[in-house]
Image (tube, coloured by chain):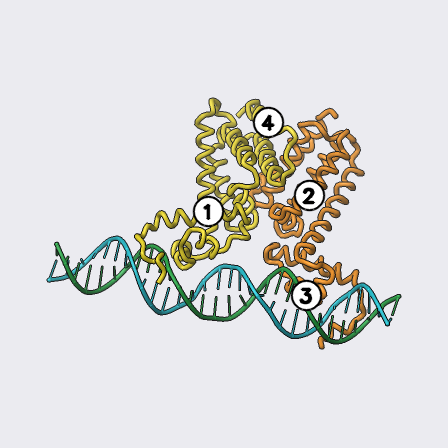
Chain colours: A yellow, B orange, C cyan, D green
Amino acid sequence: MALAHHRKKDPAQVRRQLLDQAARLSVREGLAGVSLQGVAAAAGVTKGGLLHHFPSKQVLIEAMFTDFLAALDRDIDELIAADGERPGCFSRAYVEAMFRQGDVGVDSSCAVLGIAMLTDPRLRELWAKWLAARLDRHRATDSAPELEVIRYAADGVWLADFMEVRPANRAELRNRLITVTRSVPS
Amino acid sequence: MALAHHRKKDPAQVRRQLLDQAARLSVREGLAGVSLQGVAAAAGVTKGGLLHHFPSKQVLIEAMFTDFLAALDRDIDELIAADGERPGCFSRAYVEAMFRQGDVGVDSSCAVLGIAMLTDPRLRELWAKWLAARLDRHRATDSAPELEVIRYAADGVWLADFMEVRPANRAELRNRLITVTRSVPS
DNA sequence: ATAAACATACCATCTGGACGGTTTCTTTGT
DNA sequence: ACAAAGAAACCGTCCAGATGGTATGTTTAT
């Protein structure tokens, strides 16, 4: 009977640990390299214990992604709150958030999960919902076609960052995108 | 002794068949769902035969990707040849090619390979090389920062298409991007 | 005869679970 | 206050199958 069995239960902490270790492992091995056994071992619980919290691998990955979206949401809310201008506020926040993710680089769980959502229909769905809700919420300030182009360009930069074909002058590019958002009437 | 063994050898045809079936399988199952045994069976050869042509899974995937880049290259060359204007010709071709890939939809080997390159360092490297060569070749006509933004936006649209968060008015968006490429001095 | 192309058999490892058992915590009853 | 019962949290083991190979044998082409 292992020592590990004799311990005080702290389900919230175990769950958090599992998610953190899953994120850490995904950064190192890519999401395809994340196995249930690997996460469980890294978090110091058994696979059975992990499966208590996350009944399948898909549930674990979705929980990781939900965490990621929540963090992105917070970032964007902060950026909008700090922005002095209403027109284009979401688009500016979006550009900044995408550049921030690129700043961190390939070796981050944001990058890993960003890519993961591309390969998983369910994660794509969650993203599509998130984006639709955000666009709906910011319809009054961010619906101009020019802003749409800018947001796509921000996605493209995010992709380029991930692909490590980074823009030669990133700061200038960011300024250019932000500048456009300020010149668009709502 | 299987019947398959008693047949005329046609290595070029077998290789082509392997690549085609690999592409087909990747569309249906995603690239993570493509196994050596699966490809071999679909192509009507044994795994041993497959491994003769492609000594590892990585080599097979890179061959698929090289095929994809070759096809993209041809598309872009055709688009440029048909373009009446020199300034921004590569960017226009690039926008068109990205929209074409989006037109086909998620269920295509282009989409699958596009995503695959995001997850594989070697494929990312091949993409980065391809892009760098193209940008170098078109430096005289396509180096303006505005065109860079447009190309990023095209990438973002490609990503959105893949995510199935498609632009509401795609034709208009395409025109808008193309129009910008025509208004940029070289 | 030799090499290329392909087939067949085998390998070790890993995977996502399923499942029964054990421990800890919470609730209920006295 | 204490004990018993039930539920939640976790442990440890087992499973069947799949994986990317490796090794050896057979067939075809030159």
> Residue at left 48%, top 50%?
A61
User: Mark 2 belongs to which amino acid?
Assistant: Trp
Distance, label 2 to label 4, CA atoms, is 23 Å
User: Mark 4 belongs to which amino acid?
Assistant: Ala
Q: Which residue is mark 1?
A: A64
Q: Which quadrant of the structure image shows residue A166? A: top right
Q: Which residue is mark 2?
A: B127
Which residue occupies the foreground of this view, B62 or A74? B62
Distance, label 1 to label 4, CA atoms, is 30 Å
Residue A53 to residue D16: above or below: above
Residue B8, given in percent of the width and then of the height, sits at: 81, 70
Which residue occupies the foreground of this view, B42 or B100? B42
Per the image, label 1 sits on a secondary structure element best described as helix
Q: Are marks 2 and 4 on the same chain?
A: no
- Report the disc number at residue B47: 3
Query: Would residue A100 be found to the left or right of residue B12 on screen?
Result: left
Callouts 2 and 4 close, C-beta under 8 Å: no
Q: Is residue A19 visible?
A: yes
Residue A52, given in percent of the width and then of the height, sits at: 38, 57
> Residue at left 67%, top 49%?
B110
